[in-house]
Amino acid sequence: MIYFISDLHLNESQPEMTQLFLQFMQQKAPLAEAVYILGDLFDFWIGDDEQSALISKVKSAIKTLTASGVKCYFICGNRDFLIGKRFANETGMILLPDYHCIELYGKSTLLCHGDTLCIDDVKYQQFRQKVHQKWRQWLFLRLPLSLRLKIAQKIRMKSQLDKQTKSNTIMDVNAAFTTNMVKKFNATQLIHGHTHRQAVHFEPDFTRIVLGDWKADYASILKVDKQGAEFI
């Protein structure tokens, strides 16, 4: 049994969401072979040197899980793409690239956060290209924490404003591009998050499973075992 989650957007202002995550990590995750977190675990991340009560709780939960022998894998999202080696070393979490293919109970399965599939959102893709440049990240991570926090808050506010003017179609995956990526990796199944639209889509040549976002009273958790996949 393997669990897949994404888009928790954990933050200090929604402690009930953190509690849901901790409950999942303590009760369900230990029974699994592995847990895959497909991005946006945190609402935003300004560097592995950031510290808070929330971060400490999350780190401790992941460390406890991996120390028990359960593998925990992570693909960065559009909010926490700066999670790096220090966080991974402190928690035992394994960092994966933007696209990663696994053999999942007999099905070749492509995993990603999902933002890279939304190519119709041109402004976001241009922004993504900039912030993923290694030299920009190197410079940003050497700024004082307080300044990084202010920059992150401004970016977050602008993102929220931009969303209000974008159509649902633009913010969803591009069907043709997504099909091409699945074919490129010779996969028969795709699991991703980002769009917050929990669903299972049966495409002509593959199955696309979309993880949902977490809410105060609902955790979108995909369980996959030999019997198949289901949201719990």
Image (cartoon, grey):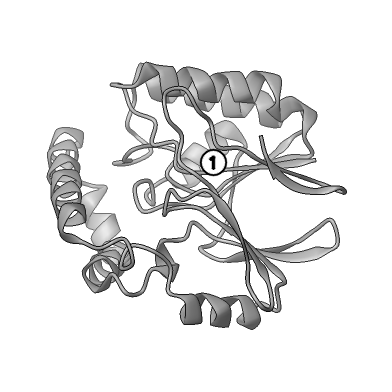
Res. 37 image quadrant? top right
State left or right for residue 204 relative to residue 194. Answer: right
Residue at image point 52% right, 75% down: 178
Q: Is 134 situated above or below 199?
A: below
Judging depth in this view, the residue of 224 and 149 nearest the camera is 224
Q: As rendered, which of 31 and 59 lies closer to the eye?
A: 31
Q: Quadrant of residue 184?
A: bottom right
Query: Which quadrant is home to the N terminus?
Result: top right
Residue that mark 1 sits on: 88
Q: Amino acid at mark 1?
A: Ala
Q: Is residue 51 left or right of residue 31?
A: left
Q: Quadrant of residue 25?
A: top right
Position of 30 relative to 107 (above/below): above
Under tag 1, what secondary structure?
A: helix
Residue at left offset 29%, top offset 65%: 128
Q: Position of residue 179 (x, y in %)?
A: 56, 79
Q: Residue at x 55, y 20 (%)?
A: 22
Residue positioned 46% across, 51% down in the render: 197
Measured as percent of width and height from the top left, residue 196 is found at: 43, 48
* Residue 60, visible in the rendered structure: no
